[in-house]
Structures are given as structure tokens and as C-alpha cells.
Amino acid sequence: MDKIIVRGGKALAGKVKVSGAKNAVLPIIAASILAESGTCVLHDVPALDDVRTICDLLRSLGISLTYDREVLTIQASRLTSVEASYDLVRKMRASFLVMGPLLARQGKARVALPGGCAIGTRPIDQHLKGFEAMGAKIEIGQGFIEASVEGRLKGAKIYLDIPSVGATENIMMAAALAEGTTVIENAAEEPEIVDLANFLNGMGAKIRGAGTGSIRIEGVESLKGCTHCVIPDRIEAGTFMVAAAITGGDVFIEGAICDHLKSVTAKLREMGVTVDEQENGIRVRRSGPIKAVDVKTLPYPGFPTDMQSQMMALLLVSEGTSIVTETVFENRFMHVEEFRRMNANIKIEGRSAIVEGGVKLTGSKVTATDLRAGAALVLAGLVAEGETEVSGLHHIDRGYVNFTEKLRQLGADVERVSPEAEVREAASSEKVKVSFSPNFA
Ligand SMILES: CC(=O)N[C@H]1[C@@H](OP(=O)(O)OP(=O)(O)OC[C@H]2O[C@@H](n3ccc(=O)[nH]c3=O)[C@H](O)[C@@H]2O)O[C@H](CO)[C@@H](O)[C@@H]1O
Ligand SMILES: C=C(OP(=O)(O)O)C(=O)O
């Protein structure tokens, strides 16, 4: 298993380019299932393990895909299966997003139950409630959810109990081909929802209100392929904003959309970090000490849960005590135990973590417990004394393109090492360290 080795103490400087958003591209690729004719051409598709997984899933449905230099071409006119296997859904929960498109286009879908994960139980009741309101029959058994409908789905008024991102997306995709109008109330407002709606509208859908709590979808009879550019990844951008701040650096994050990062920007400024919002990106600098702030995760436009662990790394080096409250996922504090290995003093009380700032972080062996936790441990390693060794990199590979390379470009002392290379190295008694390059099919 590969590891990332970080030696702390370097202030990051320079420019880093943000890749396309994982959480936008996954539902968009799922939505391409709806294109009965034409070709979908997606630009700025990041070479991530999660993207590879959803492509494998679409291939297993009979769809043909090709990927070349961040352009993904999808031909979905022929569908040979409506089943998403356990192996693919288990690897990535977002695989469940194929249910809405399959049900709308084929009248049936069989998708393995996603189950919980390290950050919470993550139920899918709101997705299913939406499909049922549109006339689908849902059956659960043998580890699968089967949904079917006689004829077309019917437009419906659906109130979500929580503004679930995935449920809003799944229902929006299903409703795009339903008969009549669907209104989703208490819909999620994330920028990724807007990107998906723009893609669907490009395919011929009639969706209004995406980005607000009320989305209105007038169903159409068919959809066709179109060309679309995926939005930049606001969480990757936010991660580099924290990297600049934690190291006392000066970094321009090219392509970051300021509007998508308001809550992160506001918190960094409250701490005393300088954030310049520019047309084509965000410049983040810090020279002096930073002060502790409280952070509470919330659905967009609130502070993103996907930035909580990275922010906690930054709070560890601030002056004072902060309270971090996680309201989106019930179990997203697994990184706390790993931070403790680095000398952090954090106490958990219910859904809050009390973070003591100003500690001297020390390099240690730590494990990524989820995708963002992995990034946060690397960030902490950038300012820790000595060497930090982060394992569990399959999590990081799900959502960050060339993470170590991008950090190294900014001057970080970080490398990815492969134990296989170390074994070879021991055999040849020659010291070799191998940097990773994603092998995207
Ligand atoms: C691929 C993708 O886009 N993933 C993002 C998406 O996940 P995802 O779409 O899974 O997150 P949701 O917005 O659905 O989940 C938010 C909360 O609602 C709960 N819930 C959700 C659905 C449901 O039917 N019932 C229910 O109770 C979840 O358990 C969670 O506590 O949004 C999350 C919240 O911003 C992010 O952390 C993830 O990175
Ligand atoms: C939780 C995340 O993703 P997913 O919903 O795919 O698990 C994330 O991107 O931080």
C-alpha cells in the first residue's frame, strides 16, 4: 500500500490549478444514461478513482465511454442492463445515482444497497420517497433495491425532510423524463446541483430553480447527448486554501470560483488569513498568527462538511480554543484520533469537537479514515515537526487529482512512496522513491 511522506516546515507559494469537481461529475456521468440519442462530451473530467468507478458501472450497463485528457465521451443509446452490482456500489456510494436515470429511461432499476460508511449511516430513504411519489414500486431484498414503474414516472410534489444532495440529484434526473411536472421542495442548493441541472437542460430537460430550495422540473419525452464543462472542485480549492493558510504561505488557486467558497473564505478571514477574490481564482496568504474560530457544518451555503477535517487541521495551529460542530454526518470525527497521534488535544462532546489551538504538532504514522480526513492529515503534516507518514491513500485517490504533485509544485516537502518500490530498493540496496501517477482507463 502506498504512503504519503510529509516533512513539515515549508511555506507554500505559487499557483495551483483546480481540477473538475468530483461531486459534480459523478451525477453528470450518471445523468448521461438518460441520453437515448447523441453523444455526451464532458470536459474537465478529473482522473479520479471515483470517476473510474462510475465509468465501470456505466460500461456494465452496456454504455460505451472513452476518456482522453480530461474529456469523457459517452454513448448511451444502447442499454443492456439495469443492474448496479454490489462491488461497484460498495466502492462508491454515488453509484446509487444511476437509480433515477435507469428507472426513468427503462422503467426499472436494480441497485445494490449502498449501506453506511466511515462518516455515517447515510440512509437513502429520501431518494426512495421521491421515486415512490412519482409512481415507482420499490422492493428491497437480497441486498438490492428494485424499483419499477408501469409506463412513465409521473410528476409529483416532493418535500425532502432534509436537503439531501444525492436525493435532489436522483429525483431531478428521474423527473426529467417523467410525465408532467415535479417540484422538489427543501431541495439541496449546492453548486453541483446547478451544474447537473445545466447539463440536463443542455440535453433538452426543462429544469428551473436549481440552486434554490425549490426546483421545478417539467418532464420531457426524450433527452439527447450534449457537450458540457464540469465546474471546478470547490472542496479541492478549499483544501489548497487551508494548505496556504496553515503553512503561512502565499498561493493562487487558479480556477476556484469565489462564489462557491464564501463560507470557507469568511472563516479564513475571521481567523486573520488574507483572501483575495479574483476573477480566475483565489489568492490566500498568511504572515502572522491566526486566531481560533468556531465552525459549524451545514448544507450549502453553510460551511461544507467536506471541509471540516481540513479546517480542524488549521484550527490546531491557531491561537485559542475552537468548537467544531458537525451537523451533516453523525460520525465524521474519525480523523480526531489520528490528529491525536500528532500531539493534538481535541475533546469530543456529542456532535462537537473542542480543539485546542497553538499545539506543536509532531510528525507521526497516521491513517486516512475517509477522503477529506486523508487530505487533512497531509495538511497537518505540512506544519508538523519531523516526518508524517499517511497511509490509507485509496481514500485520497477517490477525490484528489495528483495531490502530492500539486503540493510539491507549491514547494511542499512531500512524496508518495510505494512499498513495492522499497522492497525492490532493499533488494538492489539502492534508495528509490516512486511518485504516483494515476492510471486512468
Ligand atoms: C458524491 C457527492 O456528491 N457526495 C457529497 C454528497 O453526499 P450525499 O449526497 O450522500 O449527502 P446527502 O446530502 O444526501 O446527506 C446529507 C445528510 O442527509 C442524510 N440523508 C441523506 C439522504 C437520505 O435519503 N436520507 C438521509 O437521512 C445523510 O445521512 C446525511 O446525514 O453531499 C454531502 C453533503 O454535502 C457531501 O459530504 C458529499 O461529499
Ligand atoms: C463524503 C464525500 O464523498 P462521498 O459522498 O462520495 O462519500 C466527500 O467527497 O468528502
Image (cartoon, rainbow, N blue to C red):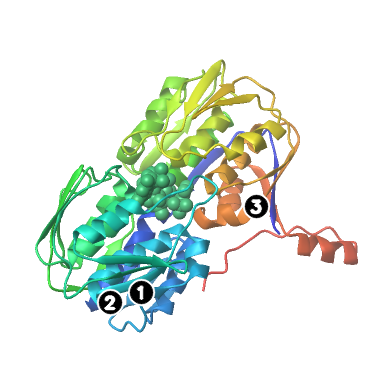
Q: From the viewer's side, name the closer residue of 69 and 291.
A: 291
Query: Which of the two marks, 3 or 2, is nearer to us in this view?
Result: 3
Position of residue 220 measured from the top left corner of the image (x, y, whole percent)? 12, 68
Comparing 179 with 227, the one in front is 179
Marks 3 and 2, how far apart at CA: 37 Å
Amino acid type assigned to the residue bearing label 1 in the image: Thr
CB of residue at label 3: within 8 Å of ligand 2? no
Image check: 392 left or right of 291? right
- Viewer can see residue 141: yes
Q: Which residue is mark 2?
A: 39
Frontmost of labels 1 and 3 is 3
The front one of 250 and 123 is: 123
Q: Position of residue 16 (x, y in %)?
A: 49, 46
Image quadrant occupied by the N terminus: bottom right
Mark carried by residue 392: 3
Q: Is residue 294 left or right of residue 204?
A: right
Q: Amino acid at mark 3?
A: Gly
Look at 60% across and 38% down and name the residue there.
Answer: 335
Residue at image point 53% right, 44% down: 372
**Decide: marks 1, 3 in contact (CB < 8 A)?**
no
**386 or 320: which is nearer to us?**
320
Q: Which of the marked residues, 1 or 3, is nearer the chain's N terminus?
A: 1
Q: Is residue 113 above or below residue 225?
A: above
Q: Secondary structure at mark 1?
A: strand
Residue 199 visible at all: no
Which comes sooner in the sequence, label 3 or label 2?
2
* Residue designated by label 1: 73
Spatial CA span between label 1 and label 2: 7 Å
